[in-house]
Amino acid sequence: MSSTSPAAPEASLPDASAPLPLFARLRHGMTRAEAEALGQGATLGGYPAKVTYGFSPNGQLENFGISAFHREARCATAFKALHDEAVSALGAPTASNRMVEGKQCENWTLSDSAIRICCRQASPVDGGTGWMLLTAIKSFSPHEKFDISNGIH
């Protein structure tokens, strides 16, 4: 038998065979057509999702948000799936806010952008079904605060 040094744990290495999540494929400066083509059939943490885009006056991508609203879903499961996607593509988050203002969030500050993923859970008030809102927001101006006007941040 030959001896070898132990390999790094596979959990810390990105899975090269897995496709990159949408938030890692959309790039600053993409045209509207390029960004919207990639956003077709978007999913977030395994849930069907909607993409909103922010474009510069000359039509280049500046920021975007991806959101998935689902009844009878739990943030604990959905957030873990999204967290695992993000860690696989980006490495460990730079900040984690566990349950701030009813949301569980994590942030990544990258060299050219900043990403925030969050999940907000609402319990039923009247005995109906609860819901969760899962979001991923990316800004190509990492120094700017996240501000999405429709409240998904």
Image: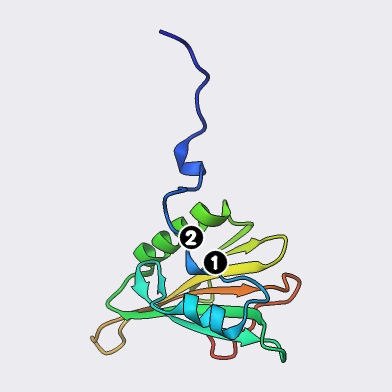
Residue 82 appears at what percent x and percent y? 44, 63
Instruction: Examine the rendered structure and indicate whether residue 9 appears above or below residue 146.
Output: above
Residue at (57%, 71%) from the top-left corner?
26
Kindly give the residue lying farthest to the left in the view shown.
127
Residue 126 as seen in the image, left or right of residue 89: left
Element carrying mark 2: loop
Residue 153 in sight here: no
- Based on the displayed image, in which of its 4 quarters is residue 85 positioned? bottom left
Residue 129 in sight here: yes
Q: Please state which amino acid type lies under the numbered disc 1.
A: Arg
Q: CA distance from mark 1 to mark 2?
A: 6 Å
Q: Nearer the viewer, residue 128 or 35?
A: 35
- Mark 2 crowdedness (10 Å alpha carbons): few <14, some 14-19, many ≥20: some
Give the residue at mark 2: 20
Give the residue at mark 1: 25
Residue 142 appears at what percent x and percent y? 72, 70
Residue 107 appears at what percent x and percent y? 60, 64
Q: Please state which amino acid type lies under the numbered disc 2.
A: Leu
Element carrying mark 1: helix
